[in-house]
Image: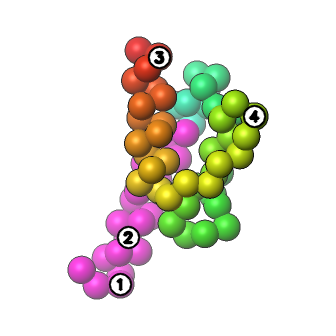
Amino acid sequence: MNKHDIKETTLDLREEVHKLAEAAFHSHLISGHGDSEYDDEYQIVHEGKPRHMPLVDARSFLTDLLEQTN
């Protein structure tokens, strides 16, 4: 995998995390979300606390949170 492929994969993962975060936000499971200052992290505000997570961890966290409500 070259540098360009890694960048594309990171962008795809960021987009997936953003969509999950939007769903969690509109379901009132989180109170905020957005890009982190670091390319490989995402910020999620859960229970009033901002958390910066690696994108892979953010995806898992949001997926679990959404599955718990279904």
Q: Is residue 44 above or below residue 6?
A: above
Residue position marked by numbered label 1 in the rendering: 3
Q: Secondary structure at mark 2?
A: helix
Q: Which residues are magenta?
A: 1-21
Residue position marked by numbered label 4 in the rendering: 48
Q: Local crowd at mark 4 within 10 Å, few (<14), some, or many (≥20)?
A: few
* Mark whose residue sits in front, 1 or 2: 1
What is the C-alpha distance between the residues marked 2 and 3?
A: 31 Å
Residue 20 position, x and y percent, is: 48, 38
- Amino acid type at circle 3 is Thr
**Marked residue nearer the N-terminal end (2 or 3):** 2
**Marked residue nearer the N-terminal end (1 or 4):** 1
Q: Is residue 62 above or below residue 65?
A: below
Residue position marked by numbered label 3 in the rendering: 69
**Marked residue nearer the N-terminal end (1 or 3):** 1
Residue 50 position, x and y percent, is: 71, 46
Side of 62 relative to 34 (left or right) = left
Q: Residue at image x 47%, y 16%?
A: 69
Side of 50 relative to 70 (left or right) = right
What is the C-alpha distance between the residues marked 1 and 4?
A: 36 Å
Residue 11 position, x and y percent, is: 44, 64
**Marked residue nearer the N-terminal end (4 or 3):** 4
Q: Local crowd at mark 1 within 10 Å, few (<14), some, or many (≥20)?
A: few
Residue that protrudes farthest toward the top in the picture: 70
- Amino acid type at circle 4 is Gly
Residue position marked by numbered label 2 in the rendering: 8
Q: Secondary structure at mark 4?
A: loop
Residue 33 position, x and y percent, is: 65, 44
